[in-house]
Amino acid sequence: MPMPGRFPIGVELRAPRLSAAADVIGPDALAFIAELSRAFRPRIDEALARRAARRERLAAGERLGFLPETRDVRDGSWRVVPAPADLRRRVVEITGPVDPKMVINALNSGADCFMADFEDSTTPTWANLIEGQRSLHAAVRRTLTHIDPATGKEYRLIENPAVLLIRPRGLHLPERHLLLDGRPVPGALFDFGLYLFHNARELLKRGSGPYFYLPKLESHLEARLWNDIFVAAQETLGIPRGSIRGTVLIETLFAAFEMDEILYELREHAAGLNCGRWDYIFSFIKACRHDPAAVMPDRSQVTMEQPCMRAYTLLSIRTCHRRGAHAMGGMAAQIPIRNDPAASERALEKVRADKEREVRDGHDGTWVAHPGLVPLAREVFEAGLGGRENQLERLREDVEVTAEQLLEVPRGSRTEEGLRHDVRVGIQYLEAWLRGTGCVPLYHLMEDAATAEISRAELWQWIHHGALLDDGRRMTVALFREIVEEEMGTIAGEVGTARMEYGRFRQAKELFVRLSTSAALEEFLTLPAYEIITTEIEEEQP
């Protein structure tokens, strides 16, 4: 819906008409995003080109390792800036999408921090993005309310809610609803820019600040890019340099080799590193996609006890604490099960064991995906911390991690049940995503884009390399398609014929099959899925 005379030169909005958008998409906000995009979109393009070039080198036989050219950074004695007062204690952080009800429940959950997620748990429909920005604007000012249309229940923020952090989309994702000079603006700059523009000064006035999680970085050069974005944005808005703080998710295999360097590049804005385990497993598959010796076992068997996962989390703790930064643990996918107390107790015990490992290793805090897990995570971590805010003093100088340890392939079996589970999860998650829901409980686990990525990527890997299942059958496209058809029947029995008829299961199935059987592994499932939802919107425009 182009609106000449109102928007800055070169800016065009192609989105459904939403009355609520006027509060978020004003001329000044759009000018700010346009300025950031003109300055940094070329560098984002360069970063994505570097990623592609490295993929080609890996396919040709290059092996990952620590960078010789940055040894001085790894050997140096520098430290990041101290954490602001409200980020010194991050014992429990909760994550989730940005709809009003979720934002209120998460901020009221008793967690120390809430990461409002525009990335893996939010489908980037225009309505979701606008509603999310409006919800966060109101949450910052403590005015956010919500009335559930189904129950009439009213939701309000408590007096001292959790500290708010925002995860914008990754550098690879475009925002096709907003064009600048004929090209989509980067989704990362859209999410980051709108939140910062509307809320930075208010947050600082309230004694907090604009805090972000940075997803899917693959190198310290991308951290340098984000640091430069922070500097430029602060200068444009006239807020003090260093007001913005960023916690980097170490959720790619590449970033695990550059943790020191990433913190160094962001050192005036760094708030720590987080072990984003699910995307990390997905990244491991992608980085090793060409190696038949690196084929994964069942997704359920790639636990945090696998040697490569232990190596990466321990290295994160040692790196962070040496630099004075928080080392945040990851998220167990289990959730409470309302109608089955015994199964719920088993799930909670898995979460407890996971959190006990994290605090014992030296993490300063952890993630949960459900408000019901906040008390358990807090109990475990506070017992381990013994009254301390964090464990920054635990330097873990006993930890020595080699490239070989980071690259050790997880071991286990490939089973028919694992195959079927991947199919059911992948199709049902994509169906929900295409309907606009990016975070879905399935089979007693909380699934988001990261966990769904593992399902489809490992199936691609099994098919591509003709991996053997534990019963001796070789994985083929024909076997995969046979299982898909059978599992569509299983899904129909679980969700009912009405859902199958009026949902988006046909599109989800077609996309999942295409992603799993294509000649080349698609980098992110959200890219073709986003094409589907935005193309539909374009076709609906007059």
Image: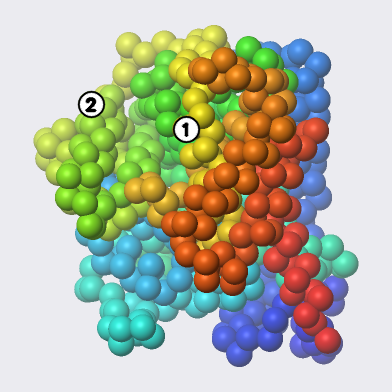
Mark 2 or 1: the one toward you: 1
Q: Nearer the viewer, residue 300 or 209?
A: 300
Report the residue at 79% width, 74% height from top.
Answer: 538
Q: Is residue 407 visible?
A: no
Image x and y of residue 275, in percent: 43, 35
Q: Nearer the viewer, residue 455 or 502?
A: 502
Query: How busy is the neighbourhood of tag 1: few (under 14 within 10 Å), some, or many (20 plus)?
Result: few
Q: Is residue 138 left or right of residue 498?
A: left
Q: Is residue 1 visible?
A: yes
Residue type beneath disc 2? Arg
Q: Dividing the image into 4 quarters, which one contains the N terminus?
A: bottom right
Image x and y of residue 17, in percent: 68, 86
Report the residue at 68% width, 39% height from top.
Answer: 481
State the residue position of label 2: 360
Task: Please identify the quarter of the rendering in which residue 338 is found.
Answer: bottom left
Query: How busy is the neighbourhood of tag 2: few (under 14 within 10 Å), some, or many (20 plus)?
Result: few
Residue type beneath disc 1? Glu
Q: Is residue 289 left or right of residue 116?
A: right
Report the residue at 45% width, 13% height from top.
Answer: 401
In the figure, 174 relative to 319: above or below? below
Q: Nearer the viewer, residue 386 or 379?
A: 379
Image x and y of residue 267, in percent: 50, 39
In the figure, 248 relative to 495: above or below? above
State the residue position of label 1: 417
Q: Is residue 393 left or right of residue 426?
A: left
Task: Return the disc, 2 or 1, that comes first in the chain's sequence.
Answer: 2
SS at mark 2? helix
SS at mark 1? helix
Real-space CA distance between mark 2 and mark 1, rounded to the nearest whole angstrom: 33 Å
Image x and y of residue 341, in percent: 17, 50
Report the residue at 28% width, 33% height from top.
Answer: 354
